[in-house]
Amino acid sequence: MYKSIFLSLMLAVSSLSLSAVTKFDEPVTKNGLYKKMIHLNPLALTIGGFEMGYERVTTKKESFYINAGYYLSSEAGALDLKDEYSNMNGFRLEVQYRFYRKPNNYIRNVYLAPFANFKTVSADYNRYIYNSSPPYGSTTVTENRSATTVSFGYMLGMRRSVFENIYMDLGIGGGIFLPVSGDNHKDLNIGLFSPYQKGVQFKASFGFSIAL
């Protein structure tokens, strides 16, 4: 009798162990651990830009990530919401080294990544000067404003599987931002998503990635 009870308990424990392994160790992709990923940021399109990133696995829980973006918009994208800007032109380059909590094939994963970022932007600012005496009216003066900033910091992110090998990638963090050229960092600053100002700033990211 005791032998039967013992065997039953052993079978139950084995069953629980197998289910736990299946829950946490089953790969999302059919081919096991992915080796590289292509990243896309759809939000960049809304401000006249295009961003693409590449991530390559270095170990089961670590990877190297690089992202580049180019911005070209006659309406100056999000800057046009702040003031009368036009003809935006910009470029950014960011590198990260990601440390994941779990191996790189999980449905949900969390990572911590130190980053280094370089970005530059220029845009035309249309300033209106109103005449207070005859002849009344206004004159438009166009000034070209520019800013270039480098930054270093950390991102805390989450990756979540949307389909078998397509992931949503969210991140928030911050670091030290150092202006290196230009005189209009405050005017061209877009808080959280595109900071340029000197000092410690928050930073956020959003995108989708395809595992290959």
Image (spheres, rainbow, N blue to C red):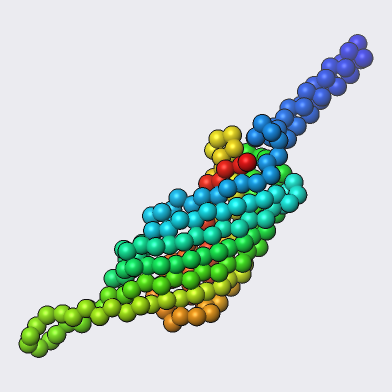
Picture coordinates of residue 204, whole percent (x, y): 52, 59
Image side of residue 78 versus residue 161, left or right: left
Picture coordinates of residue 133, whole percent (x, y): 9, 88
Q: How many labels does the image show?
A: 0
Image side of residue 30 versus residue 121, left or right: right
Q: Give residue 81's quadrant in the image.
A: bottom left
What is the residue that sits farthest to the top in this orientation?
1
Vertical relation: 33 (above or below) 70: above
Query: Which residue is at the front of the view, 14 or 114?
Result: 114
Q: Give residue 131's quadrant in the image.
A: bottom left
Which residue: 48% across, 71% down?
120
Vertical relation: 144 (above or below) 94: below
Picture coordinates of residue 118, whole percent (x, y): 55, 69
Which residue: 71% across, 35% down?
32
Residue 112 visible, this angle: no
Image quadrant where one finds the N terminus: top right
